């Protein structure tokens, strides 16, 4: 986390503008961040909803990461389209990420504070705008200091891990206390923008959808920056960088795919409707998957940069998962620790071994003279790192149907430091899943660019008993994806 934030340190002084949220000739992008999104992933909690869950995640070594991913998207947007006007809300729900990205930005207060400069006539929802003091967290993330200069560099923790917060990590108390109601209010306050970027997961997408429904025809198109544990909805870009690039393209082209010749006609090949789905986290933690479609959001149309909706494995031919599992078990060697990622296909490996592994957690198994053994079930990132360090280990991972993600969606326990410790990957997917991708690569989005690039290339994918194929893996933030 610390290393991620260090890379997001602004390279020039940051200036904060004060003004009204009004339509202008410049392409205007809004930014809303759910700062607690994704906390539960490395902790093995399968979500981040609820204060108790968030505190437990922090106790297990998780650190907030949504702000850093939002800042990555902003940097990609401004690198491609420097004249973009960025509008956001105070604190960890957007302002901190704008500072970390080195971006000039306008602040719109959700509710008028006592020291507001003045109400913003014409601003959405009666919001007020003021010049906010630079929060202490900005210096911690390597953002701008109160004098407009850069703060201390953010460095990685001693172990370079994703769990513990090293120098430059955002403190938990800087992001605690934000709610779904805050997200909805922020979306309403920023309704006058050309495109609204929001960072979070499926739960955040639901909150954005609720606010969009309230706004009706006044709602702007939106685009999700993936930062949650579960990112199964189709309204998210494949990575933070892809979100920024797609937003920049939307600012360049007309709403119907034409290059913008005047303000008010913006798009990137037009707009499309993308589904918002979510899971009830309590049954999900118990291994019960029940996805529900909540509605659709208007997003820029660019299939290669949108993640698409997750699809299940309910139409598999009988015995398909079992055949893959038999092949995996036949390749196992005594003394090697195998990390089983979440999913129905990897759960079949546990059944083949006769072990009580979990459907949606990350488990560690090994074989030997006394037979298969469950070393640990449903582990956190911190526990997993300890279990594989100094041991020969192999990660066994399945592919998310419809999206193609191999890493970074629901298996954040496999952090960059864990992936450096394992010997290699065994990738599992049915032929149907691969065919449904239409030639698009499998994706890695670990939150560390170097790790994603290292994982890129061609891998063997086990598709059945004594069956395999070669398929490409790519970093999710590659521009051409």
Image (tube, rainbow, N blue to C red):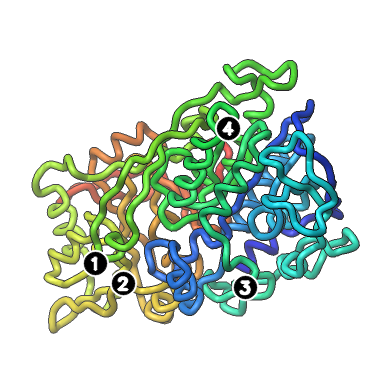
| Residue 239: % across, % down | 53, 46
Query: Residue at 48% across / 37% down in the picture?
Result: 306
**Element carrying mark 3:** helix
Q: Disc 4 or 1, which lies upstream in sequence?
A: 4
277 with respect to 329 (left or right): right
Q: Is residue 373 above or below residue 340?
A: below
Tags 1 and 2 in contact by the CB under 8 Å rule?
Answer: yes
Label of residue 173 in the image: 3
Q: Nearer the viewer, mark 4 or mark 2?
A: 4
Tags 4 and 1 in contact by the CB under 8 Å rule?
Answer: no
39 with respect to 370 (left or right): right
Instruction: Identify the residue position indicated by label 1 in the image.
Output: 358
**Element carrying mark 1:** loop
Q: Residue furthest right?
A: 147
Instruction: Identify the residue position indicated by label 2 in the image.
Output: 378
Mark 2 is surrounded, within 10 Å at the Cα level, by few (under 14), some (14 to 19) or many (20 or more) other residues, namely many
Q: Is residue 20 above or below residue 397?
A: above
| Residue 363: % across, % down | 29, 70
């Amino acid at each position: 986390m610390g290393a991620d934030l260090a890379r997001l340190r602004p390279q020039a002084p940051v200036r904060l503008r004060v003004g009204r949220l009004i339509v202008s000739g410049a392409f205007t992008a809004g930014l809303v961040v759910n700062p607690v999104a994704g906390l539960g992933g490395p902790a093995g909690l399968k979500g981040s909803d609820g204060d108790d869950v968030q505190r437990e995640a922090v106790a297990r070594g998780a650190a907030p990461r949504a702000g850093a991913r939002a800042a990555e998207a902003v940097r990609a947007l401004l690198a491609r389209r420097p004249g973009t006007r960025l509008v956001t809300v105070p604190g960890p729900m957007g302002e901190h990420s704008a500072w970390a990205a080195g971006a000039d930005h306008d602040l719109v207060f959700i509710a008028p504070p006592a020291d507001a400069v003045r109400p913003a006539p014409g601003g959405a929802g009666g919001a007020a705008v003021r010049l906010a003091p630079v929060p202490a967290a900005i210096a911690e993330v390597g953002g701008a200091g109160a004098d407009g200069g850069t703060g201390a560099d953010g460095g990685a923790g001693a172990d370079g891990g994703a769990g513990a917060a090293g120098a430059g990590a955002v403190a938990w108390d800087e992001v605690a206390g934000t709610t779904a109601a805050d997200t909805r209010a922020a979306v309403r306050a920023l309704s006058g923008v050309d495109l609204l970027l929001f960072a979070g997961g499926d739960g955040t997408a639901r909150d954005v959808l609720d606010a969009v429904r309230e706004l009706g025809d006044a709602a702007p198109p939106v685009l999700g920056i993936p930062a949650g544990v579960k990112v199964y909805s189709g309204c998210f870009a494949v990575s933070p960088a892809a979100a920024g690039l797609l937003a920049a393209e939307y600012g360049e082209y007309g709403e119907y795919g034409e290059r913008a010749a005047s303000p008010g006609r913006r798009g990137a090949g037009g707009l499309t409707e993308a589904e918002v789905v979510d899971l009830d986290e309590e049954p999900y933690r118990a291994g019960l998957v029940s996805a529900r479609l909540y509605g659709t959001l208007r997003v820029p149309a660019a299939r290669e940069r949108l993640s698409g909706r997750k699809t299940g494995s309910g139409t598999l031919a009988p015995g398909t998962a079992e055949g893959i599992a038999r092949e995996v078990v036949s390749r196992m060697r005594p003394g090697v620790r195998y990390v089983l990622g979440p999913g129905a296909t990897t759960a079949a490996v546990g059944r083949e071994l006769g072990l009580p592994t979990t459907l949606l957690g990350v488990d560690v198994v090994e074989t030997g003279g006394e037979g298969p053994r469950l070393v640990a079930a449903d582990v956190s990132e911190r526990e997993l790192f300890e279990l594989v360090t100094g041991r020969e280990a192999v990660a066994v991972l399945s592919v998310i149907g419809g999206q193609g993600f191999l890493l970074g969606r629901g298996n954040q326990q496999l952090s960059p430091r864990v992936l450096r410790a394992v010997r290699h990957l065994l990738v599992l997917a049915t032929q149907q899943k691969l065919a449904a991708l239409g030639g698009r690569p499998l994706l890695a989005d670990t939150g560390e660019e170097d790790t994603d690039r290292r994982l890129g290339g061609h891998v063997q994918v086990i598709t059945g008993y004594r069956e395999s194929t070669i398929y490409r893996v790519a970093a999710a933030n590659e521009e051409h994806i």
